[in-house]
Amino acid sequence: MPSVKKEKVSKTKVRHHYSSEDKQKILAEAEKDGETISSIARKHDISASQLFLWKKQLNGKSKKTSVLPPESSPLTQNNYQEYIAELERVLGKKTVEVEQLKEKLGSFA
């Protein structure tokens, strides 16, 4: 059973913190024959959607991936240009999202 850190968020809510190893162990259970993500989620008292998110993150398909370069690789001129291009792409995407939200909010005013 994974060791879980618990943080009290309010009188009735507790936030659970799982290590990367624990997340991988829980997801590995779902890979076994006959086990579904939903059944593993119930077993560990975790939302099935949380397990699907962990699975995406593990496979590198999460929207929450960092645009920062890995600390282990020094920035060369080429890496630096790629890094700047990625930051510009993310900034552009966020700018479009903000503008779309402003338009939607404007229709409620």
Image (cartoon, grey):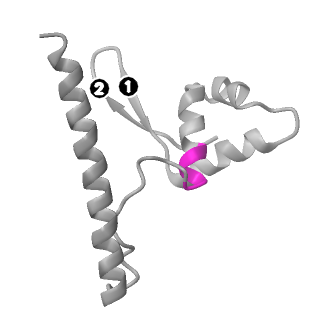
Dominant SS of magenta comes to helix
- Residue type of the residue flagged with mark 2: Val
- Label 2, on which residue? 9
**Nearer-the-camera pick, 86 or 51:** 86
Q: Nearer the viewer, residue 68 or 102?
A: 102
| The N terminus: image quadrant | top right
Say which element carries label 1: strand
Q: Are marks 1 and 2 in contact (CB under 8 Å)?
A: yes
Who comes first in sequence, dot 1 or dot 2? 2
| Mark identifier at residue 70 | none
Numbered marks: total: 2
Quadrant position of the C terminus in the picture: top left
Residue at 53 percent across and 33 percent down: it is: 50
- On whether residue 22 falls in the magenta region, the answer is no
Q: How far apart, in angstroms, are the residues tagged by discs 1 and 2? A: 5 Å
The magenta-colored residue range is: 55-60
- Could one spot residue 85 in this view of the protein? yes
Residue 34 in picture, x, y percent from top left: 87, 32
Res. 72 image quadrant: bottom left
Q: Residue at x 64, y 28 (%)?
A: 41
Residue 32 spot, x, y in % from top left: 83, 42
Quadrant position of residue 51: top right
Marker disc for residue 14:
1
Three-letter residue code for mark 1:
Val
**Residue nearest the viewer, comparing 70 with 4:** 70
Does residue 59 belong to the magenta stretch? yes
Above or below, 106 relative to 97: above
- Toward the bottom, the furthest residue is 76
